[in-house]
Image (spheres, helix red, strand yellow):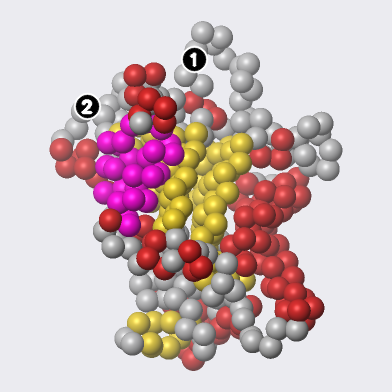
Amino acid sequence: PAPRDGIGAAPALWPKLKSLFDGDANDQKGDSNVFRAGVFSACGARGVDKMEDRHLIVSDVGGVRGVSLACVFDGHRGFECAEFCRRNFEKALVSVWHECATPEEALTKTFASLDEAFVDAFERTKVSFGESKERFPGCTAIVAMRWGERVYVANAGDCRAVVCRQPGCLGSEEDKKNSAWVALSADHCADLNQSERARVVAAAGPEALRRVNGVWRVGPAGLAVTRAIGDGDCKPFGVVATPEVVSYAVDADDGSNGGGDDFALILACDGVWDVVSCADARDLVLDTVKEPSMSAKRLGSEALARGSTDNVTAVVAFLKQTDTAETVTWERAF
């Protein structure tokens, strides 16, 4: 589309995007914008009527060529917040990015605007339909935006982003093992994240936390996470929608320097990470034929096979071009 109202025009202050026509005309690699994504999503043991996960994959975000977006929204206490985020995230991001000096600022502002808009919209909907039951749906969210040679990851909650690396031929076996994956997010769980508990106490007092069956929870609702979109009843108890944002320089070279290439990014909900380690997830993606939907399906299916009791959603995005010999289409695979 033509540049208008922020559509089709990249923010002027952000890192300059490399044009597809820049550089050596014979260079077929073009790794600076690669983001080939696929997804697997299933209700799992919870059943179809309890499917609260949503996801979003967008190419050419806001009409800007080469900019990609992938999101996983893990709903709780209802699907409504996750669905609201799926429908509105791209529009909300594009509506603010020209006002922001950096991608990190734009992503943070987008989370805040969606949180405010959803809480307001859901309250008005309850009044309109005369709901007598007090409900406060929310969702955790992890978002990855590929902008040129960097990936920006914003996380609020216990979804997780992991970069899969292919170790080079040099170095010890221990070096190869340690370089196999890089976590781009931290889980905001009340029970496991001591710094988040400290933040909640500083914001809302020690009474904001309580033990439920020996596990730390937040507020009277007993929320397991300390950051989330929605959850209007938990905001007075230190729960925030503010994401932690990481800027990551993608290493997608050919590995000739002996270093590890960043070949894929995994975004997944806690239904995956509860039963699959980061190292196992990386190995599953590496060992699967190089088609992102198939890699996501293998990862999600493995989580189900290992007995995940939650909804399962996994997005796998390749960050570099794959050789023709490695690429297998669905038609050839089955």
Dot 2 alpha-carbon crowd within 10 angstroms: few under 14, some 14 to 19, many 20 or more: some
Secondary element under disc 2, as helix, strand or loop, is loop
Q: Does the magenta-highlighted stretch encompass residue 299?
A: yes
Residue 251: image x %, image y %? Answer: 41, 32
| Residue at the (66%, 61%) spot, across then down | 84
Q: Quadrant of residue 327?
A: top left
Which callout, 1 or 2, points to the residue nearer the camera? 1
Q: Quick one: label 1, few (<14), some, or many (20+) residues within 10 Å?
A: few
What residue is rendered at 73% in x and 79% in y?
A: 126
The disc, 1 or 2, on the residue closer to the chain's N-terminal end is 1
Q: Which residue is mark 1?
A: 28
Residue under label 2: 169
Task: Please check the rendered image and state whether residue 96 is part of the magenta-colored stretch, yes or no.
Answer: no
As shown in the figure, which amino acid type bears the numbered disc 2?
Answer: Cys
| Secondary element at tag 1 | loop
Q: Is residue 276 left or right of residue 23?
A: left
Residue 124, position in %: x, y?
77, 76
Horizontally, residue 183 falls left or right of residue 99, namely left
Residue 40 in picture, x, y percent from top left: 44, 48
Q: Main secondary structure of the magenta part?
A: helix
**Does 278 appear above or below 117?**
above
Start and end of the magenta stretch? Answer: 280-304
